[in-house]
């Protein structure tokens, strides 16, 4: 995958560190695919929202600290995920009672 010409130096360091840990990016990619697939269907949306939440928080933090240009999209993704979690809160309540 080509590196964008305008990528900040701090982001280049982060991506280089991620690539040094050879199992990390395949794990994140698998979680994104599984969480996204679960999120598509109404029956499994509650589980998908919880599975993909840590990835979205990571995306949000990366955009806050390293690449603020992507922050609006990261915030929209977080809001959609939070909406799905709140919409399915009755499925989570028995876990904390």
Image (spheres, rainbow, N blue to C red):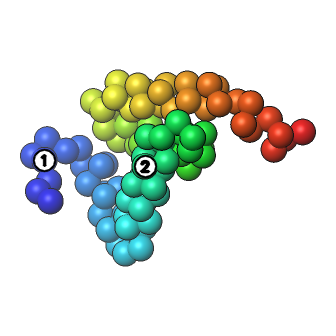
Q: Residues within 10 Å of mark 1 (few under 14, many from 20)?
A: few
Q: Residues within 10 Å of mark 2 (few under 14, many from 20)?
A: few
Q: From where the camera sits, is residue 56 visible?
A: no
Quadrant (top left/top right/bottom left/bottom right) for the C terminus? top right
Horizontal arrangement in the rendering, residue 36 relative to residue 83 (left or right): left
Q: From where the camera sits, is residue 7 visible?
A: yes
Q: Which residue is mark 1?
A: 4
At a point 43% along the width and 40% down the height, the residue shown is: 40
Quarter of the rendering containing residue 74: top left
**Of labels 1 and 2, the one closer to you:** 2
Residue 77 versus residue 34 in the image, above or below: above
Residue 72 versus residue 60 in the image, above or below: above
At a point 72% along the width and 37% down the height, the residue shown is: 91
At a point 26% along the width and 54% down the height, the residue shown is: 12
At a point 56% along the width and 30% down the height, the residue shown is: 84
| Residue 46, percent from left and from top | 60, 39
Q: Count the numbered circles shown.
A: 2
Q: Nearer the viewer, residue 85 or 22?
A: 85
């Amino acid at each position: 995958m080509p590196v964008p010409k305008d990528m900040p130096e701090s982001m280049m360091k982060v991506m280089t560190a991620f690539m040094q840990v050879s199992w990390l990016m395949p794990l994140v990619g698998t979680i994104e695919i599984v969480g996204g697939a679960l999120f598509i269907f109404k029956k499994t949306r509650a589980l998908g929202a919880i599975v993909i939440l840590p990835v979205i928080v990571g995306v949000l933090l990366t955009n806050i600290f390293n690449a603020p240009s992507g922050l609006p999209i990261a915030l929209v993704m977080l809001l959609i995920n939070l909406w799905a979690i709140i919409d399915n809160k009755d499925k989570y309540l028995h876990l904390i009672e």
